[in-house]
Image (cartoon, grey):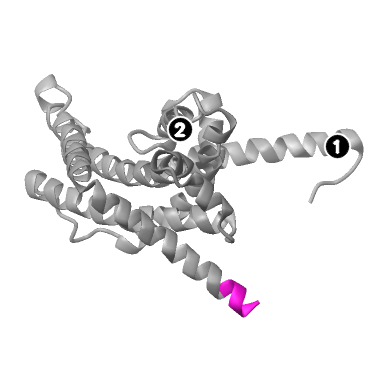
Amino acid sequence: MIGVRGSEMSALFGFAERQLYVYKRYWVWEVVWLFYSIVSVLSIGFLASGLGSLGVSGGSFDLRKAQLYLLIGALLWGYLSLVFMEAAYAIAWERWEGTIEYTFMAPVRRITHLMGICLFAIVYGLARTFIVLLVAVAIFDIDFSHADVAGALVVLAASLAPLIGLAILTSVLPLLSPQKGEQMSFAVQGFMLLVSGVYYPLTVLPWPLQAAGFISPHLGGKACQGARLAEAKRVKGSKQLWAAGLGVIPN
């Protein structure tokens, strides 16, 4: 058993290292995508800065807080979307590189293969997001001296677990439909952005989308805590009514 576990761990890091070599081969394109990530985050930041010229500032509205809220949301979503797409395209990468037959015939578990790719995506995503963060801090003069770094890491870790599971589920779609399976990753990613709460609290959404956000990998933090508690009470009440109809008492 120890030998089997050791070989699986070696394969896990081996798949992560293989992804690193693939990225080294296409490093120019990674520079392009890094530039795109920086531009996307800066666009969100400048959007918040421009709200003042539209007459939004004044009164109880804190323009600086809104800018910080949107910038953190853009950084968080940029990182999570990168991890999701890398894991969701795990099978597509194999097809593009012409290695899918060799990978599937290798004496390793499929979860080892997919988690190795996810491991690389997590580390690579952190490095790229850190670079984007440095650029955003330099341009918008953001002060993180009072930031709760430990709390942010907990939220990030809690967001990654269900995200990776959904990405692995999405990654097998090209095997079911070689023509359209890959495109479904963009559809799933778009829906997750809608119910994630990274750019707005879930309370602004219609109830069905709030419910989807409640059961999805939620990323919005305390802003939507009230909506989650209300949904939990509603579900508990429904269970009690259902149990009363059957004459049993729920736990």
Q: Secondary structure at mark 2?
A: helix
Instruction: Judge whether residue 3 is colored magenta.
Output: yes
Q: Residue at x 59, y 78 (%)?
A: 3
Residue that mark 2 sits on: 185
Q: Secondary structure at mark 1?
A: helix
Residue that mark 1 sits on: 244
Visible in this render: residue 75?
yes
User: Horizontally, is 128 left or right of 247 in the view?
Assistant: left
Specify the farthest residue to the bottom. 2
Type of amino acid under label 2: Ser
Q: Is residue 156 above or below residue 239?
A: below
Residue 219 image point, x, y percent: 42, 44
Residue 215 image point, x, y percent: 57, 39
- Where does the magenta region start and end? 1-5
**Dot placed on the residue nearer the N-terminal end, 2 or 1:** 2
* Nearest to viewer (mark 2 / mark 1): 2
User: Of residues 153 and 3, which is closer to you in this image?
Assistant: 3
